[in-house]
Structures are given as structure tokens and as C-alpha cells.
Amino acid sequence: MLLVLIAWLYVTLLMGLVEATAPHGTVFGGLTTFLFYGVLPAALVGYILATPARKRARRARQEAERGAASGAEPDAGGHAPTAAEADGVAPVRKEP
């Protein structure tokens, strides 16, 4: 998709260049053509298409913060290790 955005910017740059060098065109017209037909739409499309990557990065950062906050590394199964309970239940035994 990046190639499409670069190609679109190239086409709009040429449109702006033609507008600026036309007999009745102006440099201001060429710049506004490039800005409004090229840069702003390309920025909007690029922002929208990058949304899933931003979400993945945010989730990875949150998971890393959660892992650092607990101070425990997950085991091989991917689950967080548990600590021994201080107030555990006494084992059941037969009465004498």
C-alpha cells in the first residue's frame, strides 16, 4: 500500500507542476493542488491503514508493562506463575 501512496503523491506533484507552469496557472495554484489532492488525502489514507499496526503495538506495550509490573516471568505454558498461599488449608488425615 505504501507504493500506491508514493505513486499518488508523484501524480499529484506532477499535477501541481503542470498547474504552476501553465500559461494561466499560478505557483499558488500548483501548491494548493498538491496539498489538497495529494498530501492531505495520502495522510488520511495512511493514518487509516496504519490503525491495526498501532493497535498491535499498544497491546504489546501494555502486555510488557503488565509483565514488568508483576515481576514474575510467565512459565513455558504462557501463564503467569502463582505464589504459594500463606493461609492454605491443612491436609486431611485420619483420626487415630
Image: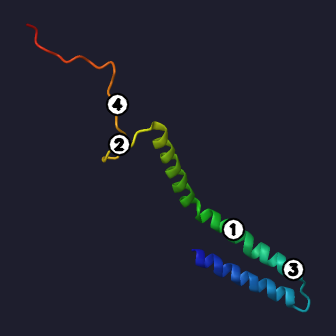
Q: Amino acid at mark 1?
A: Ala
Distance between mark 2 and mark 3 Cα atoms? 60 Å
Q: Amino acid at mark 3?
A: Gly
Name the residue rendered at 10%, 12% in the picture.
94
Question: What is the residue that sits farthest to the left in this orientation?
Answer: 96
Q: Does the CB distance between marks 2 and 4 fall below 8 Å?
A: no
Distance between mark 2 and mark 4 Cα atoms? 13 Å
Q: Amino acid at mark 2?
A: His
Q: Nearer the viewer, residue 19 or 93?
A: 93
- Sequence order check: which comes first, mark 4 or mark 3? 3
Q: Nearer the viewer, residue 73 or 7?
A: 73
- Sequence order check: which comes first, mark 1 or mark 2? 1
Seen in the image, is 37 located left or right of residue 6?
right
Q: Position of residue 45 (x, y in %)?
A: 65, 68
Which mark is in front, 2 or 4?
4
Distance between mark 3 and mark 1 Cα atoms? 20 Å
Q: How is the image coloured?
A: rainbow
On screen, residue 79 above or below 48: above
Q: Does the CB distance between marks 1 and 2 fall below 8 Å?
A: no
Query: Which residue is the site of mark 4?
Result: 83
As helix, strand or loop, the secondary structure at mark 3 comes to helix
Query: Which residue is the site of mark 3?
Result: 29
- Binning the other alpha carbons within 10 Å of mark 3 as few (below 14), some (14 to 19) or many (20 upward) gives some
Residue 43 disc label: 1
Q: Quadrant of residue 37?
A: bottom right
Q: Quadrant of the N terminus?
A: bottom right
As helix, strand or loop, the secondary structure at mark 4 comes to loop
Residue 79 disc label: 2
As helix, strand or loop, the secondary structure at mark 2 comes to loop
On screen, residue 79 above or below 94: below
Q: Amino acid at mark 4?
A: Ala
